[in-house]
Amino acid sequence: MPIRSRITGTGMAVPECVVTNELLSRCMSTSDEWIVQRTGIRERRVSPDTYRMLLRLAEAPDKTAFMRDVQARGLDGNIDSSLTVSDLAVEASRMALKNAGLSPADLDCIVESSTLPDFAYPATGCVTQGKLGLTTTPVFNLAQGCAGFVYGLALADQFIRGGMYKRVLVIGAELLSSAFDYTDAGRDMAILFADGGGAAVLEAHEATGAEPRGLISHHLHSDGSAIDALMGEIWGSSTFPPVSKKKIDDGRPWPRMNGRAVFVHAVRRVREVVQESLDANGLLADDIDLFIFHQANLRIVESMAESFKISESRMHNNIQRYGNTAGASVPICLHEAVMGGRMKEGDLVMLVAFGTGFSWGATLLRW
């Protein structure tokens, strides 16, 4: 009997600290109206360290000097973070395991994706595995940015279909808020990104019936010809040394993004991969019961809704509340959709993401 991977538990984690557009408007030249109009975001969650820094920045007379000092010396000389990306990954993972009725010891493998790890190395997945109390469970660490969770599902699915593993935990976790310049110079990225974690447990099940439940197909792509449109240099070996005073003085550790280029590529590639998934399975957009798009920008999602005639009732969006949580975006949306009863048994669900690399992909599953 053929084997299908089925999602048996989901989980999510977000920091308690809420940053409104109003707070950001006290740190840079922006407004609630400007941010909502261009992104759809009204608030986002960030680490306690970032939140404390933003409150201080809002009152700083020279905001550029304040941000440079924070990057060079930390806030009040602090070195250790009060919240790390692996903390978010662990919290989301424990929730997913609980909802699946499993313990960490039941796992055969972990696939984790994060843009910024706790350390330069080891990667976040290994740190998370140790915090879950595991000592021999294999970990695969991905770096596909916002597309990481979709890539992780594809990898885990192949492990299960091939018979190598029976239970795989897939995690997308991000703590990006500490990486941005919250002055006018970094506004384009700082208003978008936020922190969070999401996870899903995949288990092997026999594919029974004419329309078996579980993951159906994956469609993945990358294009490394436009890396300058979305990148970060800190700790990269493209410069020597990876960290230097000159690099800090030049502002090169801050992530960089060409917003217009990313938007154009994202709209084009997401539209293509949705159609590819539909064509590969002989479906029309109307056949999909629920679309979960990466929450990068509400305008991108609205563009897809217009292109494929997707009603609001057939999408789950939360960018208004959480901002762009990158690789955590899709699993957080998935968890909320599950907990909110958005899918019933037998529904077709499509997960779609686009991120740095550029990397993008779509996963089709039957719930």
Image: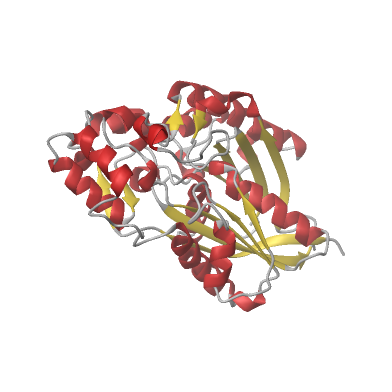
Residue drawn at (44%, 64%), measured in percent from left and top?
87
Where in the figure is residue 220, as x and y percent of width and height?
A: 69, 39
In percent of width and height, residue 315 lies at 49, 43
Residue at 74%, 33% in the rendered image: 279
Q: 4 or 256: which is nearer to us? A: 256
352 versus 210 height, above or below: above
Residue 224 picture location, percent across and down: 64, 29
Please give the name of the residue rendered at 39% of the width and 32% of the height, measured from the top-left corner: 246
Would you identify the image quadrant in which residue 83 lies?
bottom left
Q: Is residue 159 left or right of residue 111?
A: right
In the picture, measured across the screen, residue 159 lies left or right of residue 102, that is right
Q: How many marks?
A: 0
Picture quadrant where residue 28 is located: top left
Q: Is 278 placed left or right of 265 in the picture?
A: right
Q: Residue at x 22, y 39 (%)?
A: 66
Quarter holding the N terminus is bottom right
- Which of 268 and 80 lies nearest the eye of the viewer? 80
Q: Report x, y in % for residue 361.
A: 64, 39
- Decide if residue 244 is in sight here: yes
Q: Nearer the viewer, residue 150 or 90?
A: 90
Q: Is residue 164 left or right of residue 300?
A: right
Viewer-nearest residue: 139 or 321: 139
Position of the C terminus by quadrant: bottom right
Relative vertical location of residue 300 with respect to residue 326 in this rendering, above or below:
above
